[in-house]
Image (cartoon, rainbow, N blue to C red):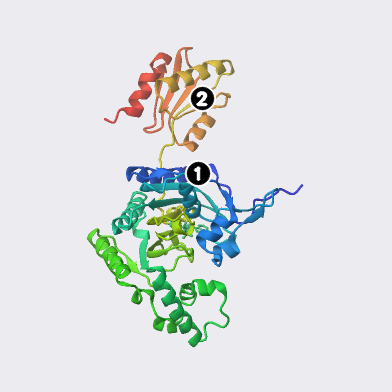
Amino acid sequence: MKIISSVKGMHDLLPKDSIIWQQVEYTIKNTLLNYGYEEIRFPIVEKTKLFNQAIGYNNLVVNKEMYNFYDRNGCSLSLRPEGTASCVRAIIKHGLLYNKQRLWYHGPMFRYEKPQMGRFRQFHQIGIEVFGYADICIDIELILLTSRIWKLLGLSKYLSLEINSLGCLKTRKKYYKELITFFQKNKLLNNIHDNIINNPMRLLEKYKTLSILKQAPLITSYLDNESYNRFLNLQKSLNNMNISYNINPYLVRGLDYYNDTVFEWTTNNLGSQNAVCGGGRYDLLVNNFNCNHSIPAIGCAIGLERLIILINKSNVLLKNKFLIDVFLVNVNNKLKNSIISLSEYLRDSIPSLKLVVDFYCSKISKYRKQAYQLKTKILVIMGDNTLLSDQLILENLINNKKEVIKKSYILSKLLLILFDNN
Ligand code: HAM
């Protein structure tokens, strides 16, 4: 029978890789916690109209990339392509709008894109959303927070910050008109479809290698005073905080809800899928949901697959030399029960102990090989026929010292090796 393969663009994560994922996720979540961000969880499936309304009916992600289906009741549902829409829906539903919120979420997103390096149909994001802060300080905080994460992961030198301002809705309408006229004049636009009218800035991305584009109008020249000053203040603050950035007037973002500040962290190490994290302000989105309430908001999302490919490619692997403290093994069939009680006694005594037990009697040489594969600090052997009944062999794989000890000394010996830093 033919083995059933996984869905194109959706991948398994094996233990050798999940260990890196866990470390990366831990670093990011811990940083978020330290900045006072709180976790929110929402469903993977939402009503299709949520994304239509939030991201835009004519948006490419909504039109071409969503996984849509009908449930048994005929309700049109979608696998979430991103988290911002669901997050806004959830905070409106639960009345969290009236207080300031710093939130994060983590999970799979789904987009029917053409798979390639760094682009998948199921991918994972850690998203960050902040509600209730209009001041530029929160834009800076978000950039500083993500910058700190790169630093902690050893990635700072591989990531550059790109910023742009998309201005307010009024500015954009005016600018889009000018841009469409420019593309028409230069015969770069034969038929205007909804997608383009909705966001002609995407054509700037598409044609960015054409020299004629140097003459295209740029949004930054159309900003009103408020947006202009905001953008200037963003740059000043980034300068003050020693955060390098490039102003990229072609930076559009793929989702339609943004205004003013938009940013992306990009890398040269990932080919064309170069954005590892992207976001911006979306001050109009809450209002879009007809809740008669304008709430300033900003957020971004980190693409975990791309981040981890970058970590692997940049050789900054978060190498953990040891993953297991003790590998406790038994080489005498009669001692199966004793080894279980010894392992539980050790777990009770040292709650943080990472201990793996093997009950089956294999050869010591095989167990030693396995201990190295598991990245173990200490191999403890029970039941070798050279030992007295109350003895154990303890092999310290950190310094390759081996000794025979009395079983009753095992706890104090382990504490000494594992926790004595002198
Ligand atoms: P986004 O730019 O569409 O923004 O996605 C954020 C990140 O998710 C990207 O920078 C990239 O690393 C990763 N990503 C996107 N699509 C794929 C894919 N097909 N395969 C692998 N990785 C991918 C958003 O999703 C917004 N919700 C971010 C945001 C939050 N804006 C405001 N708040």
For the question of whether residue 295 can be seen, the reply is yes
**Quarter assignment of residue 362:** top right
For the question of whether residue 318 can be seen, the reply is no
* Up-down relation of residue 387 to residue 106 (above or below): above
Q: Label 1: few (<14), some or many (≥20) within 10 Å?
A: few
* Mark number, residue 79: none
Q: Quadrant of the C terminus?
A: top left
* Up-down relation of residue 412 to residue 54 (above or below): above
Residues tagged 1 and 2 counted as in contact (Cβ below 8 A): no
| In this rendering, position of residue 53 left or right of residue 67 | left
**Image spot of residue 196 (x, y percent):** 52, 74
| Front residue of this view, candidates 369 and 108 | 108
Q: Nearer the viewer, mark 1 or mark 2?
A: 1
First in residue order: circle 1 vs circle 2: 1
**Quarter assignment of residue 60:** bottom right
Q: How many numbered callouts? A: 2
Is label 2 within 8 A of ligand 1 (CB to nearest ligand atom)? no
Secondary element at tag 2: strand
Mark 1 = which residue? 18
Q: Which residue is drawn at the image coordinates 67% and 49% (left, top)?
A: 71
Mark 2 = which residue? 329
Q: Residue farthest to the top?
A: 389
| Front residue of this view, candidates 144 and 52 | 52
**Image spot of residue 185 (x, y percent):** 48, 87
**Image spot of residue 126 (x, y percent):** 45, 50
> What's the distance in space between the residues labelled 1 and 2, CA to CA?
25 Å
**Image spot of residue 152 (x, y percent):** 34, 49
Tell me the amino acid under the disc marked 2. Answer: Val
Secondary element at tag 1: helix
Is label 1 within 8 A of ligand 1 (CB to nearest ligand atom)? no
